Image (spheres, grey):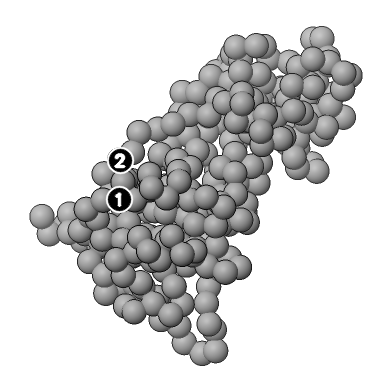
Amino acid sequence: MALITSLQNEHVKYVRSLLRRRVRHREGRFVIEGTRLVEEAVRAGIRPALLFYTPEWVASPQGQRLLPFLSAEEGNWAVSEAVLRACADTETPQGVLAVVPCVHPLPRAGLILILDQLRDPGNLGTILRSAEAAGVGEVLLAPGTVDLYNPKVVRGAMGAHFRLSISALDWPDIAYRVAGRAVWLADVRGQMPYDRVDWTQPAALIVGGEASGAGGEAFALATGTIYIPMAGETESLNAAMAAAVILFEAARQQRALTARG
């Protein structure tokens, strides 16, 4: 097979350009790395725009299993380890990466999660993974939140980008989207324990950023504030853990309602 070894190759330069946010948004594409994420794209029925893999990966059991399902629009390309490392965000890429389109799954019925000023990409990725697992209907990213297609967000979300409705919106659009719902804001000084809320009713949850929490627009939109009771001297959980605790309580209540109904 022909092997790309030059960083000056046009496909290589294009993939590397997608490490920049403005290019991702202009092109409507982003990069996924590793067998697991490529497999998630295949399961979601997403055709890559470009596929890069090393000879070692294509000869592996994982490569042999997945490659028949991968026909990239602009070609499947074998590349050297050095080229793959130059195109990847991780220090030790797993032998394969793909350029995929930014897809926009439709919202589902259920809780709306709003993330405000969440700047840590690892936390955002983890929250998106938890939101999908908890059956959240859609996620809205308020201004000041890290880019949805940041490589660390993509890795942490583990394929949630392909299945969960996620939109970056300004506050007026967010307010329009949650009109008619109870809007609960998670805050360490909240008024009500999170498990006292009736999450079976139409609702939205706002989770603020790691450093200073939610901003003024979030508090203005909220119809109430909630907190997670904690023992000992612990004052708060990080954003990803707090979101998961609340989301799975909402999911528990929904399951209980379905079981009764």
Residue 101: image location, x then y, percent? 55, 25
Q: Quadrant of the N terminus?
A: top right
The one nearer the camera, 197 or 37, is 197
Residue 179: image location, x then y, percent? 26, 51
Of helix, strand and loop, which one carries label 1? loop
Q: Residue at x 56, y 57 (%)?
A: 118
Label 1 or label 2, whichever lies nearer to me, is 1
> Mark 2 is on which residue type?
Arg
Q: Is residue 224 left or right of residue 242?
A: left
Q: Mark 1 — residue?
A: 178
Q: Residue at x 54, y 84 (%)?
A: 234
The one nearer the camera, 144 or 50, is 144
Of helix, strand and loop, which one carries label 2? loop
Residue 197: image location, x then y, percent? 26, 70
Q: Residue at x 24, y 55 (%)?
A: 181
Alpha-carbon span between mark 1 and mark 2: 13 Å
